Amino acid sequence: MKKYLLAPGPTAISPEVLLSMAQPILHHRAPEFGELIKRVREDLKWLFQTENEVLIIASTGTGGMEGSVSNFLNPGDKALFVNGGKFGERWGKICKSYGVLTEEITVEWGCAVNPDDVATALKKDPTIKAVFTQASETSTGVAHPIREVAEVVKSYPDCLMVVDAISALGVFDVQTDAWGLDVVVSGSQKALALPPGLAFVAVSEKGWARADKVNNAKFYFDFKKEHAAIKKNQTAYTAAVSLIVGLEQSLKMMKTEGRENIYARRALMAKALREAMTGIGLASFPKQSPAVSVTAISVPEGYDGQAIYKDLRVKYGITAAGGQDHLKGKVFRISNMGYLDTFDTITAVAAIEMVLKAMGFPLKLGTGVGIAQEILLKK
Ligand SMILES: *Cc1c(COP(=O)(O)O)cnc(C)c1O
């Protein structure tokens, strides 16, 4: 059976990237590797839309999140975090394990944070030293208005705006410098279409100034050490060499396509999938602001989302994702990230129709496919 990886991470990888990683391994202190880092540094700045360095760390995205707490906050400092799903919740957990006091904005799963709530919280407690949020909350398929939140945070000179853009950067517009984002985290296995194992972190000058005042216990995720290393085209410890070779290839392909073209293409795929689902009677889960990166689809009354997700895999070789926590069984998710194009979206829609039909759900086969085709048709 042919396999299709349509999960929101790890995502499908292009043959170009896979082949690039099959080359004999470079030594991480060899001059060729320094040259590679030099090129990748520039390309990452392009992707993050920043003039500052982007750190490359051998860890999953969560390591990048952890370092974004431990490098910028002291125990006893106060942080505000947006909790609108699994990954928002994680900011709170990391803060707690570093003795950081937390204030939480609870957002109903499926909704986006209201920037006014951030403004209210900061006004109430101006000692808050950082605001943590996701750009795209992968567990609910919602995009938070990070540009507007950053606008609020900007007027607090002692407060950092920290964004988990792990399922956002490279899929929709995230303007690190122009929007005043102080710390932006990404990871390799989602939008960048690489295997898991790399985290990326961009840090503003405001962020580095804060890091100088922080003495939190940390060792491996010491961002100042990584910052000094990358400026010399190195990583502090053994680099994930092969992944960085793949990264160069992935970034090269992204640059060839162009940022705006990527965003437009992904947005169209997400729209086609969402409208095809609505067209066959499956509502989009987000109540507002659906993210381009992942489409969360509500399961119709009387049907089991876990069964839909399982049938997709067992009958058709398609790996999607189910819902997490209280959404288990009620939602399933399809990625618009990774090495995907028009016909992956159509494949997803066709397979969902076939799975639902077999379960007795009333629908005319091809209805959703037709809707998706209309939207994706290159006129
Ligand atoms: C996947 C993901 C993470 C966690 O990344 P890992 O690589 O699994 O550690 C964090 N935040 C968001 C928004 C994600 O999608």
Image: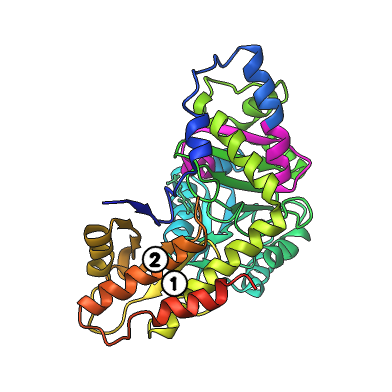
- Residue 322 falls in which quadrant of the image? bottom left
Name the residue type under label 1. Trp
Name the residue type under label 2. Ala
State whether residue 111 appears in this view. Answer: no
Residue at the extreme front: 379
Chain part drawn in magenta: 40-66
Query: Which residue position is annotated with label 2?
Result: 348
Residues at marks 2 and 1, CA–CA distance in whole angstroms:
24 Å
Query: Which residue position is annotated with label 1?
Result: 109
Residue 43 magenta-highlighted: yes
Name which residue lies at 68% across and 65% down. Answer: 149
State whether residue 157 appears in this view. Answer: yes
Residue 335 magenta-highlighted: no
Q: Nearer the viewer, residue 177 or 92?
A: 177
Q: Where is residue 269 in the image (x, y as percent from the top left)?
A: 54, 67
Which secondary structure lies at badge 2? helix
**Relative horizontal placement of residue 130, taking residue 177 as reference (left or right):** left
